[in-house]
Image (cartoon, rainbow, N blue to C red):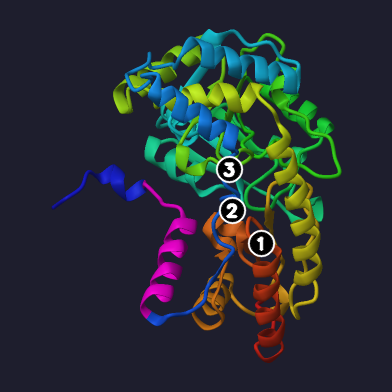
């Protein structure tokens, strides 16, 4: 069977591939694998949210909604974002989708085409690059460098902008590096967008998972709500990855386009999950607060452990739940070391190159696992690495 040519331009996500391989090792070889590869909280969804979904099912919320989502749920998102960021969105500027990936896909496919350029972070979430290429637009990676704490360098961004620049994608806190853009970064980025007339998609899926700092959104600078589109969802902070519910906040005209895309793709998000969304966003926030506090403990633990492994050097992140250790002193290629750790040590992490060419020399580990399991993984690597050090890669 011959696929359409565009399928050759569609990428994938290595975290799920590594998860499948790790599970196969567990199943077929009986290996105990420590899962630090997937970006999914190990907590259960808070009980009040699950109860709200069950109640909605029992009340008959099992039918279609409008493609944009229930009005009450879009109002809840608008109210939530006002409480969090101080920005007042109209419900017509909100679209609810089955996971925030659909917002990302819809915006890129709607806004970018052949002849346009889209700037995105490298290393970065791999689906950005995948969908840009699928759209036919030209991908323009902006390197995130360790000397800048993996924040986007605004001077470097300015040098990449051309008259063809249509869209900039930013992600803060960032996957995979967990870096956070400062308020000053946001102001300079927004100024460039205005001066050169391009749009910004800000991926804020980790914006509630921050430590030791304040969070700023570029959307707070977009007073007329005409240039910035926000992507967010339930998966990370409410431990609801499998529920598949996300949303976007955007100019009304753009929202109308996303609604049309959703009509053609999924029709609407699941109705009873939308009812649970209301409880999650406007109900008690004790559970996510406890989750973030636990993530902070794990962060401190894993960073300390990573820096005790020979050949590893790891910055302390201020957001999300990933560490991004520099492994160049081991002399190993990132892919090769990630493969060795999985198949020989039973430690599942990801090669930095799974997130772009500028990820070479790094690995990503998720600390959305227990301190006990993180400790096991660190102990295995600490014992093994001294004998594995090679001459540094040139």
**Helix, strand or loop at mark 1:** loop
Mark number displayed over residue 370: 1
When the figure is inspected, residue 383 is found, relative to residue 172, above or below; the finding is below
Residue 237 coordinates in the image, percent (x, y): 64, 39
State the image coordinates of residue 180 (x, y, percent, origin top left).
75, 42
- Magenta part of the protein: which range? 10-28
In the rendered structure, does residue 211 fall within the stretch colored magenta?
Answer: no
Q: Which mark is residue 239?
A: 3
Q: Quadrant of residue 142?
A: top right
**For mark 1, does the 10 Å Cα neighbourhood hold few (<14), some (14 to 19), or many (20 or more) residues?**
some
Residue that mark 2 sits on? 42
Badge 3 marks a residue whose secondary structure is loop
Q: Quadrant of the C terminus?
A: bottom right
Q: Are discs 3 and 1 less than 8 Å apart at CB?
A: no
Classify residue 175 as left or right of residue 329: left
Q: Residue at x 47, y 36 (%)?
A: 101
Q: CA distance from mark 3 to mark 1?
A: 14 Å
Residue 36 in sight: yes
């Amino acid at each position: 069977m011959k696929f359409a040519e565009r399928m050759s331009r569609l990428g994938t996500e290595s975290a799920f591939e590594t998860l499948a391989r790790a599970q196969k090792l567990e199943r077929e070889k009986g290996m105990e694998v420590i899962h630090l590869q997937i970006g999914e909280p190990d907590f259960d969804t808070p009980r009040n949210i699950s109860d709200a979904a069950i109640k909605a099912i029992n009340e008959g919320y099992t039918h279609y909604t409008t493609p944009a989502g229930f009005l009450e749920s879009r109002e809840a998102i608008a109210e939530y974002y006002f409480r969090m960021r101080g920005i007042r969105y109209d419900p017509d500027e909100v679209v609810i989708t089955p996971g925030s990936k659909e917002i990302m896909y819809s915006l890129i496919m709607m806004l970018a085409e052949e002849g346009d350029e889209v700037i995105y972070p490298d290393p970065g979430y791999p689906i950005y690059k995948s969908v840009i290429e699928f759209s036919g637009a030209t991908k323009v990676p902006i390197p995130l460098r360790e000397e800048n704490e993996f924040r986007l360098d605004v001077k470097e961004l300015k040098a990449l902008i051309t008259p063809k620049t249509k869209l900039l994608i930013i992600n803060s806190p960032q996957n995979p590096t967990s870096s956070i853009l400062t308020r000053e970064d946001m102001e300079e980025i927004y100024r460039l967008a205005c001066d050169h007339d391009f749009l910004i998609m800000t991926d804020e899926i980790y914006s509630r998972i921050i430590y030791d700092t304040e969070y700023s959104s570029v959307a707070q600078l977009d007073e007329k709500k005409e240039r910035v589109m926000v992507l967010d969802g339930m998966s990370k902070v409410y431990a609801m990855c499998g529920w598949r519910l996300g949303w976007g906040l955007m100019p009304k005209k753009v929202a109308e386009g996303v609604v049309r895309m959703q009509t053609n793709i999924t029709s609407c998000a699941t109705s009873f999950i939308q009812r649970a969304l209301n409880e999650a966003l406007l109900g008690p926030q004790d559970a996510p607060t406890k989750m973030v506090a636990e993530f902070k403990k794990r962060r401190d633990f894993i960073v300390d452990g990573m820096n005790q492994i020979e050949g590893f050097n790891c910055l302390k992140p201020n957001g999300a739940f990933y560490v991004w250790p520099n492994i160049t002193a081991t002399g190993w290629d990132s892919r090769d070391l990630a493969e060795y750790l999985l198949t020989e040590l039973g430690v599942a992490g990801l090669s930095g190159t799974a997130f772009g060419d500028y990820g070479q020399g790094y690995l990503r580990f998720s600390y959305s696992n227990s301190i006990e399991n993180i400790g096991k993984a660190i102990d295995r690597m600490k014992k093994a690495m001294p004998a594995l050090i090679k001459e540094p890669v040139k």
